[in-house]
Each structure stands twice: as C-alpha cells, then as structure tokens.
Image (spheres, grey):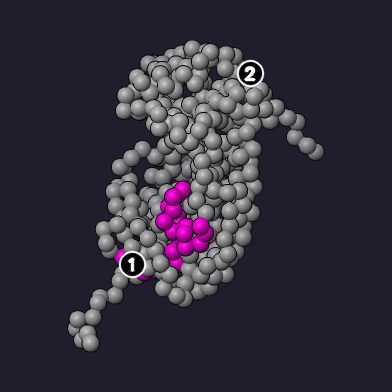
Amino acid sequence: MTSPSHAASPLPHHPIAVVGAGLGGLVLARVLHVHGVEVALFELDASPSVRMQGGMLDIHDDSGQEALRAAGLYEEFLERVHPGGQAMRVLDRYGTVRLAEGDDGSGGRPEIDRGELRALLLGSLPEDTVRWGAKVSGARPLGGGRHAVTLADGTAFTTDLLVGADGAWSRVRPLLSPAQPAYTGVSFVEADLEEADLRHPVSAGVAGGGMLFALGAGRGFLGHRESDGSLHVYAAVEAPEDWLDGIDFGDPDAAKAAVLKEFDGWAESLRALVADADGPLVPRRIHALPIGHRWDRVPGVTLLGDAAHLMSPFAGEGANLALIDGAELGLALAAHPGDTETALAAYEERMFRRAEVSAQDSADSAALLFRADAPQGLLDMFTATPAG
C-alpha cells in the first residue's frame, strides 16, 4: 500500500482548456477574458512567429465582424484593414477580363492580413494565456464531464471543459465523432510574387488591387494582393488525391513545370503567376468534413472552427466561422456560469445550423468555379439581380 508521502502528485487542473491558438481559440479566450473568466490555451507552435499565418482574410459583417465586436476589438480591427482589398477581377483562361469591381470602402467584407488579426487577438490577452510548444497527443474522459489531456512531452493536465479548436486533424474530435476529413477532389499549389508592382508588373496588373479569379474548366488561378504589396496565388486543379505526390517540390523549376503543364493553352500572363513565383511552391490538398457534421452532446467537451466543420475555402467562410464560433461559445459560457452543459447545448445548436449552410455553400461554390463553362457560373452569381 502506497503511503501518503509517496502518493502520485495530482495533475495540473484548468477549469477551461482550449486546444489550438488559431483565430477561433483566441477569440474564445478573449470573450471569456472580457467576462472575467480564465482560460488556458495549448498551442503546438513554439512561438507566435514560428511560421507564416497565411494570406488575406475577408471578414464578413454578419459573422467575423460580430465576433470582433463581442471581443471588444472591432475598432482596432478597422484600423488594420487593407484599403482597396475588396476589389475583384474575374478573367477567363485567355486572360480576358470578364468582370472588374473596385473597392470604394462601402463593402461589408473588409480584408485583413491573417497574421495581423492573430496578433491583435494575442495582444488582447494576458501574457500567460497561451502555452506555446504544447502539442496535444490525446485526451480521455474521466467521468462527470472532466477530461485528462496528454501532451507530446509526456506531461498531462485535467480540465472541466475541453474545447477542440485544433483544426482539420483535431486530436479532440474523436471524443465526439468518428468523422475524418475527406479529399474534395481539388488540390492547390500556393505561390508568392514579392514586391509585385516593382518586380512582377505584369502579374500585378493581372491581379489588380484585391481578389483575382482566373478560371477555366477544372482549374484556375485564385489570388489576392497582400498588404505588403506581394501577390499570394493558388493554382487550383481538379485532380486525383495522389497528383501532388508526383511533383518534386524540392526542385522549384521542376515543380513549376509540372503545375504549368495543367495550364497548357492558358494566357502567358496567367501562367506567369506560377512561372515567376519567388521561393518554393507549396502543395495543399483540400479536405472537408461531411456537410452537416454533428454529434450528440458529450459532457465537458466541444469543438469549434475547422475541428467542428472543416470545409473547402471556396465560399470564404472558414475563418469567419471560427471567429463567430469562438465568440458565441464564450458568450454562452459567460451567460450560464456554473451550467456548462446548458451553455454547450445552446452553442452547438446554433453552430451546427450555421456550419451546415456554409459547408453546402462552399461545396456549391467549388462546383460553380470550375465547371465546364468557367468563369460563366461565377459571373452569373455576381451579376444576378437580388430577389425582392
């Protein structure tokens, strides 16, 4: 029998633990902080600056902006938006401009650099909120809604409420659902053209000041102007899941040639978006969880953002849903102190409905963007007369 002096030390305990310090996890922590509720975030990145945070995000007035209002950060967000970022150009494969819209500042989806938004959220939290370099390897229920969470370094902690904000391949999701993301049939190859106006003037002219859609059957170039003047471009191809495996991305010239082979016959001004890219190309398969993914209420655990409803990026909803998920979960918890289950049930009911609509929109948009007569489907959508 073990004597009291030799009993195992109890694990560290956090009343609320959030796995993942992306946008959703951070806005949840911020809303809880505003309401005087402490939370601990566990993030696998070693520091805030360990990797690039992606490109521009358009923050929607009915979701992402509402989340930032709830977080008390809306005015500071507006100070960081990218002027002109809501401009848009739609081209066909021959480089013909089929639609061009400017940005007069009146649109409802201002653009901000993802890194800027993440920095704003991080700066609004107490310094010790995020535990950096904390990779979660697993979690298990202890009963009564409590969970034990194990980290890759062998340490562990317990929590009364575990929130999975840890993205597409969530380690928390298996506690709630067996669902796994599936390949959507589209692969991206990302490219950057730095100092575009100076070093890549043709590509800068093609892209314009905001979003670019250059589309053909089963493929296209999607891009946007970054706040630093560079261009971030996605070469999108409907392809088998193993297509990217056959490309040597360690050899930039070979990788460019392989990607551009998919765009034979396209205008040289469009092919230059990849041919003239600075630095290595980056491959990315597009995955999604099933449309309408949901789970039965499980005490003491929930998900938000991509962990809950990963979808393709073609409706621009991912970051916005993560933000509104985090804000609404925080508001629900603050509104029901001491009654976590009521808060989680209310949050999940709204989140499931919202995510299903957005996931369907994303799938429909993917079909529309790359259909046989592209870009006609996108042009029809943008020029349709609103009903009523």
Q: Compared to 194, does 326 lie above or below?
A: below
Give the residues drawn in magenta, as a range. Answer: 156-178
The reply, left or right, for residue 306 in relation to residue 48 is right
Whole-angstrom CA distance, mark 1 to mark 2, is 56 Å
Mark 1: which secondary structure? strand
Q: Is residue 369 visible?
A: yes
Q: Compared to 259, does 52 lie above or below?
A: below
Residue carrying label 2: 98
Query: Looking at the image, is mark 1 or mark 2 nearer the viewer?
Result: 1
Q: Looking at the image, which residue is at 54% across and 48% down?
A: 289
Q: Residue type at mark 2?
A: Arg
Task: Give the label on residue 123, or none.
Answer: none
| Position in image of residue 130 (x %, y %) | 34, 55
- Asked whether residue 48 is drawn in magenta, I would say no
| Position in image of residue 247 (x %, y %) | 39, 27
Q: Compared to 129, does 299 lie above or below?
A: below
Q: Quadrant of residue 12?
A: bottom left
Q: Looking at the image, which residue is at 58% across and 57% down?
A: 294
The foreground one among 94 and 261 is: 261
| Position in image of residue 329 (x %, y %) | 53, 59
Other residues around mark 1 within 10 Å, as few (<14) / some (14–19) / many (≥20): some
Residue carrying label 1: 157
Q: Quadrant of residue 243?
A: top left
- Asked whether residue 159 is drawn in magenta, I would say yes
Q: Looking at the image, which residue is at 47% across and 59% down?
A: 174
